[in-house]
Image (cartoon, grey):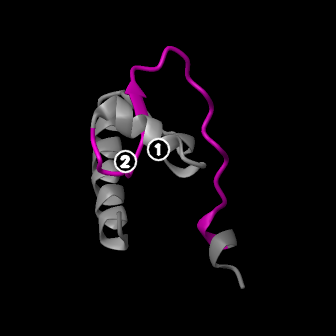
Amino acid sequence: DDESSWLRVGEIYEEMAVMSEKEGIATAVLAAPIEIDNYYQELQKILRTNWRPQLFFRIGYPTKTFPKAPRRSLEKVLKP
């Protein structure tokens, strides 16, 4: 549960999310179970571990599709 671990977990999730997306599998990070209050302790009990969970997410084949959020053009992003 330190900065190095947080970065590595993020890198691993990023790789997994990209690979999943290529296969049509959706992922979604769920922050509440590990970041709010002591919810992470209940997750520790379920997982039977003393290690603090670093990431909680769901993964699966979506039954619905949703439109992507609109993106700004490169010119608008780089405009001073």
In terms of depth relative to the viewer, which is nearer, 23 or 72? 23
Q: Which quadrant holds residue 32?
A: top right
- The amino acid beneath tag 2 is Pro
In terms of depth relative to the viewer, which is nearer, 47 or 60? 47
Looking at the picture, how far across and down is residue 40, in whole percent?
46, 44
- Find residue 53 and name its label: 2
For residue 73, side relative to residue 6 (left or right): right
The residue that appears at 36% across and 28% down in the rendered structure is 25
Query: Does the magenta portion include 16?
Result: no
Helix, strand or loop at label 1? It is helix
Q: Which residue is mark 1?
A: 40
Helix, strand or loop at label 2? It is loop
Report the predominant secondary structure element of the magenta stretch: loop
The correct choice, above or below, for 76 with respect to 20 in the image is below
The region drawn magenta spans 49-75
**Callout 1–callout 2 Cβ contact below 8 Å:** yes
Looking at the picture, how far across and down is residue 12, in whole percent?
27, 53
Q: Which quadrant holds residue 74?
A: bottom right
Residue farthest to the top, as pictured = 63
Q: Label 1 crowding class (10 Å Cα cut-off): few <14, some 14-19, many 20+?
A: some
- The amino acid beneath tag 1 is Tyr
**C-alpha gap between disc 1 and disc 2:** 7 Å
The correct choice, above or below, for 14 with respect to 7 in the image is above
Mark earlier in primary sequence (1, 2): 1
